[in-house]
Amino acid sequence: MKKILCLLLLASAMPAFSQGWVRYSQTEAATHYFDSLRTRKMGDTSFVWDLHDLAQASTDAQGKTFRSVLYATEFQCRAGKHRRLGIARHAEAMARGTPVSEDAGAGEWIETRTDSLAGQLFKHICE
């Protein structure tokens, strides 16, 4: 059931370019955004689309080139934890175009460190 939910979440992101992208971090490797229009909070749990717009193209394990990565991420705000629900790699910047590869399935819960990218996103989503 969780795999189906993850696939549905990824499918809903196909027209992923949104007017709601908010930049939350800039690194040498990428500019990081979250989708303010599609962020959902249910009690202590928040769901967010996390977009990493890469400075340079990269390749996946199958050798396919991509320029952006869109993560479906879930936060447990009080516990200070997060996990990935799915990943879609896109050939074009800002998650435009058809995904070149996708991975669905909930990952393990990870403690959200305040000095990490996830910690920066946590501040916007949970606080």
Image (tube, grey):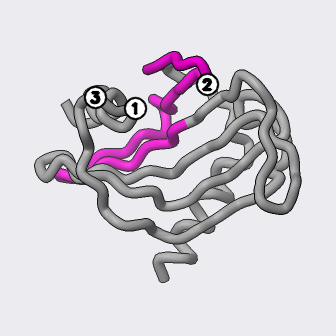
Q: Position of residue 68 (x, y in %)?
A: 71, 36
Q: Which residues are magenta?
A: 24-50
Q: Secondary structure at mark 2?
A: strand
Q: Position of residue 111 (x, y in %)?
A: 24, 51
Q: How many marks?
A: 3
Would you identify the image quadrant in which residue 29 lies?
top right
**Residue that label 2 marks:** 30
Q: Secondary structure at mark 3?
A: loop
Kind of residue at disc 3: Asp
Above or below residue 40? Residue 35 is above
**Which mark sits nearer the N-terminus, 2 or 1?**
2
Query: Of residues 47 and 37, which is closer to you in this image?
Result: 47
Q: Secondary structure at mark 1?
A: helix
Above or below residue 96? Residue 11 is below
**Residue 109 on the magenta span:** no
Left or right of 106 on screen, residue 96: right
Kind of residue at disc 2: Ala
User: How many other residues sit within 10 Å of disc 1, few (<14), some (14-19) or many (≥20)?
Assistant: some
**Residue that label 3 marks:** 115
Above or below residue 91? Residue 127 is above
Q: CA distance from mark 2 to mark 3?
A: 17 Å
Q: Position of residue 50 (x, y in %)?
A: 51, 38
Residue ranking furthest to the bottom: 1
Left or right of 66 on screen, residue 17: left
Q: CA distance from mark 1 to mark 3?
A: 7 Å
Above or below residue 1? Residue 44 is above
Kind of residue at disc 1: Leu
What residue is at 84 percent from the left and 40 percent from the top? 91
